[in-house]
Amino acid sequence: MSYAYEMDRPLAARAAESERVSFIRRTYMHLGGAVLAFVALEFLIFKAFSAEQLSQFLASFMGTPVSMLIILAAFIGVGYLARWWAYNGTSPAMAYTGLALYIVFEALIFVPILWMATYGIERINPGASEYLLAKAGIMTLCVFGGLTLSAFITRKDFSFLGPILSVAGFAMLGLCIAGMLFGWNMGLWFSFLGVGLASAYILYDTSNVIHRFRTDQHVAAALELFASLAYLFFHVLRILLILASERR
């Protein structure tokens, strides 16, 4: 069996049923693997460093708007590179490298909010962290599962959302940058917008799995789904954190 990408493979929508089913199965197996790898990395990070060590690190490297902007720029750059490798790699090894790079960087980006959910919220409202991550995870999976099921049942082509999502994504990015620079309080409204944007991306990505990806692009498809799932989880968790911090 050759390990070179077969760039002439058909779109999944036009492939034979057995090949299409195999592509979809591989895509969601890789998505599941990406989620497990992300969880394992976070577990190792939080086991390797104490709460105070993580707190000092976050204060040192993420305590100023400039550092936050650098991290945001790095995240955008890494995301672009990971996608380029996953989509345009000349071998499966390069595609997997792109997916692995994205998972590792997502794990690092999530450290601050996971620290807040695990330790920080306890300093504001003791007992508020109980089952917080589990609740956010379950809610995220329910939303993701419902949207995925809807896309597969209706088989509607949501590719028309592409330009809309690009504009909305840049608008959210602009709000994020403005909040960092001017110290705006990005409250619940920001994360509700984030949940809406992530949900639309999940529909869009799932539609592309059904209609737009080639049958050899399961790694790239898994990367896109993982990115949208992680973005949804981030904002769901942020909403729960804000609500928990206000509860007395």
Image (cartoon, rainbow, N blue to C red):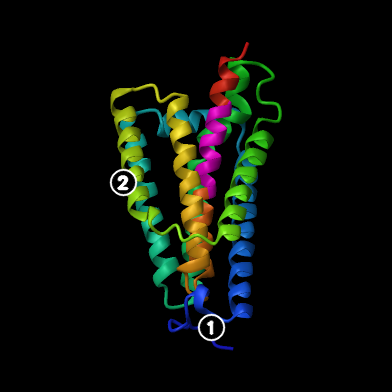
Question: Magenta region, mostly helix, strand or loop?
Answer: helix
Residue pictured at 49% horizontal, 71% vertical: 217
Image location of residue 98, percent across then percent down: 46, 63
User: Is residue 5 inside the magenta stretch?
Assistant: no
Q: How many marks?
A: 2
Image location of residue 49, percent across then percent down: 60, 37
Residue pictured at 45% horizontal, 68% vertical: 212
Q: Is residue 227 visible?
A: no
- When the figure is inspected, residue 2 is found, relative to residue 94, above or below; the finding is below
Q: Is residue 13 or residue 115 the one in the foreground?
A: 13
| Cα–Cα span, label 2 and label 1 | 37 Å
Q: Secondary structure at mark 2?
A: helix
Q: Is residue 211 or residue 116 the one in the foreground?
A: 211
User: Is residue 232 inside the magenta stretch?
Assistant: yes
Which callout, 2 or 1, points to the residue nearer the camera?
2
Say the numbered circle drawn on residue 3.
1
The C terminus: image quadrant? top right
The disc, 2 or 1, on the residue closer to the chain's N-terminal end is 1
The boundaries of the magenta stretch are: 229-240
- When the figure is inspected, residue 128 is found, relative to residue 114, above or below; the finding is above
Residue to which mark 2 is pinned: 167
Residue pictured at 70% horizontal, 30% vertical: 131
Image location of residue 243, percent across then percent down: 57, 21
- When the figure is inspected, residue 115 is found, relative to residue 138, above or below; the finding is above
Amino acid type of disc 2?
A: Val
Are dots 2 and 1 in contact, CB under 8 Å? Answer: no
Q: Is residue 8 or residue 132 the one in the foreground?
A: 8
Q: Is residue 204 visible?
A: yes
Image location of residue 18, percent across then percent down: 64, 79
Amino acid type of disc 1?
A: Tyr
